[in-house]
Image (cartoon, coloured by chain):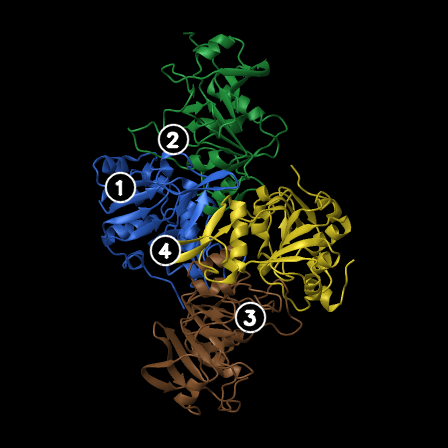
Chain colours: A blue, B yellow, C brown, D green
Amino acid sequence: MDKTIQTTAEAVAQIPDGATVMIGGFGGSGAPIELIHALIDQGAKHLTVVNNNAGNGHVGLAALIEQGRVDKLICSFPRSADPSVFVESYWAGKIKLDIVPQGTLAERIRAGGAGIPAFYTPTAFGTDVAKGKPVEVFEGRSYVQERWLKADFALIKADLGDPHGNLTYRMAARNFNPIMATAAMTTIAQVSQLVGLGAIDPERVITPGIFVAGLTEVPNPAQEEELNWAEAIYP
Amino acid sequence: MDKTIQTTAEAVAQIPDGATVMIGGFGGSGAPIELIHALIDQGAKHLTVVNNNAGNGHVGLAALIEQGRVDKLICSFPRSADPSVFVESYWAGKIKLDIVPQGTLAERIRAGGAGIPAFYTPTAFGTDVAKGKPVEVFEGRSYVQERWLKADFALIKADLGDPHGNLTYRMAARNFNPIMATAAMTTIAQVSQLVGLGAIDPERVITPGIFVAGLTEVPNPAQEEELNWAEAIYP
Amino acid sequence: MIDITDIKLSNAQIAWRAAQDIDDGAYVNLGIGFPEMVARFQAEGKQAIFHTENGVLDFGEAPKPGEEDWDLINAGKKAVTLRPGTSFFHHADSFAMVRGGHLDVAILGAYQVAQNGDLANWSTGKSGIPAVGGAMDLVQSAKRVAVVTDHVTKNGAPKLVDACTLPLTGVGCVTRIYSSLAVIDVDVAGFVLREKISAISTDELQSLTGAPLHANGPVQKLICPKVLA
Amino acid sequence: MIDITDIKLSNAQIAWRAAQDIDDGAYVNLGIGFPEMVARFQAEGKQAIFHTENGVLDFGEAPKPGEEDWDLINAGKKAVTLRPGTSFFHHADSFAMVRGGHLDVAILGAYQVAQNGDLANWSTGKSGIPAVGGAMDLVQSAKRVAVVTDHVTKNGAPKLVDACTLPLTGVGCVTRIYSSLAVIDVDVAGFVLREKISAISTDELQSLTGAPLHANGPVQKLICPKVLA
């Protein structure tokens, strides 16, 4: 078994129009810029994207939105240093926004991967965000029922990867990547370094290969912050 | 801040009669034998214990039960190579048993640590174990509502520990230890090696120190399997 | 009633047959005891990846006696070994893997399997101390749930039944049974006979089965290597 | 109405005052922006441990310009540094830490705080694109939720109000307010004045506050170092 894929283009080739795609990262850290750009090149449209943010500048997720590929965004914080692409799309009515508190977003994704269709959280009780959701009292406190969140595909960024799909992450670039890997039917990882089977210490594996359908090596991946300082625009 | 405690006796000194105590481990792997023995010496009784099993031989959890300290056991699998202590206590009506499917037990503990008062699982739907529990249908499938599980104390076994309580585990000895650490008001860890702050690679920390109230070094900890072959009896 | 003592498959042969249906790279959980034997009979060129509830993925076979590390065990508390590709995780993550539907196959033992796929394998009823372990999680959530079992109990009673009389492990979960006499699928029609050993007739097999055996396409010969370690 | 321009505390002074209430070893989350300033004013001999939503515990201050590593950032997407004791974890674990009640203190900014402890700090209403981030999780689950804020808006309107008119971040969650004029607890009685700057009278402070200020014990002088970086 070898889950290695030669190119980012090949890695995202199967994503159809209308797919729900989770994209890892928090701001620029952990964002799979090269996979997103490959998805732009591939052309899939009418996507629903799950990401903590809404893109920054004109690269990565912002570029995907700028190309008009995203019908709906599920996120917690659609602000950034340069959110102009999202803001313009939003006010033009080209993109729908579903705001989810960050911890609820993370837990819904984790629940999707863990086979938990619903759970209760104190987060957002009594706020507009919880409107219309079931509320239940446990031990005298009110909680909101939240539902799992799953995706057709997850595009994630990892540090090391082996042919079975075992992955590690680099520092805070871990963020949403490991949980999104569990919640998608098909998880595609870009890894900064592909290593041989057995080269990753079993104690250090953060995402076991069972969650990964394919991985492709992208050495020296672009960092969103640096692309934005260089005023990069994709494509 | 230094969470180091000098002795196992001191580490368990505050556990009162009637406490709910989570004890890590799966069979012998990851079982904090020395902390359990210190708890026997300490004398607390009428305990509710949460553990995957019910002890083996006459050491560790089995010894705690044999001393009559455990009123109730919450576990998934009260069988072992030598379950005689539990079996005799059970048939003598000295200990109550609450059987929980292993994955539900793990998720209830995780929920306790994660502030999730209830969640839905497909596990045990339609079985005796789910009797009396709320059932809800999501997307055409029936799920059982399960509640979080918390404890007053958790006694866990780790490999490396630093003065802030950051912990690593050794191979499959990880099991229930990291989740129990999150679900107790007070988590006490025995570590095979106490290392200086900064000596554990931040990427390798499995239990961040926020979950640990105190830790004590037990070099070369006893392994339950080996004690049982030696027919050890505690105390 | 026919005496199947000399014609039935051994546990090793049943395990061999179950192993033939496991794809290369499949993620598999084997129940404690008899089902563990399946790992020994993987088809040539195929390598499954085994999961154990206590937080190990892709572990290897048992170590040599004396070389056990008791921090490296499987759900049956037997020592296992590392392989290139092994990973460790805690119990909640382990069952997230199970419950989230990420396992391709779970193979378990059975006291009874009903024609609607219900499985009873954890409790013999009132007597004895109940012990469920991870079975209830596995049977509800693995993509494919199979059973390896003798076709009848030691007393000759059917283990494939109309409806389970013992406490259930899971409802409607079993899709294939590898018995000591046959391979039987469980689908909306009930028990569907796929393969049987040549030494028994369909009528004889039916007489040892507690619910109707349906046919859906040809019934193949169930042929296993005769001698298995 | 009294002009507080020259007498009110600076943001740095408010942050300094908030920092004095943080115990050594406390686990603390600071909101993006102004609240982040609290980290700079920890009391002598006390070292809090800072949590950031994106999966870092016990991180250090900002690196020198040019030495940033953009894989090591905080929730405000600012570069931070490693410390001895740092650990990394994924987002679900990070918010399990938050939601599970493991943080000792969360300090946030506010648009409005109501006398029942309701907080509004995420949306100014209809205009603008909503962005909630992790605030709703933090305010419901940290052991202590405090606010650092100007006492009034730029237009002079009270930020401490009878009832919030802006969309809520959380209900009944704030227990202490560090404002530019006073330190005010929020308990069952409503706003309880604990400390105020000497340059303002209690009546004047009340006139700038949208709900009654109660007394419960002596009101201390709110004294902060005058010049803070």
Residue D158 position in % (x across, y down): 41, 17
Work out how far the residue at label 1 is from the one at label 3, CA to CA, in angstroms.
Answer: 50 Å
Return the residue at label 3. C32
Chain to which mark 2 belongs: D
Going by the numbered disc 3, the residue's amino acid type is Ile
Return the residue at label 1. A96
**Res. C92 visible in picture:** yes
Q: Is mark 1 on a helix, strand or loop?
A: strand
Q: Do labels 1 and 3 share a chain?
A: no
Going by the numbered disc 2, the residue's amino acid type is Trp
First along the sequence among labels 1 and 4: 1
Work out how far the residue at label 4 is from the one at label 2, CA to CA, in angstroms.
Answer: 30 Å
Work out how far the residue at label 3 is from the one at label 2, CA to CA, in angstroms.
Answer: 52 Å
Q: In this view, does B201 lie to the left or right of B42?
A: left
Q: Crowdedness of circle 1 by 10 Å Cα count: few (<14), some, many (20+)? A: some
Tell me if residue B166 comes above or below residue C56 in the rendering: above
Relative to the observer, which residue lies in front, B171 or D189?
D189
Mark nearer the viewer, 4 or 3: 3
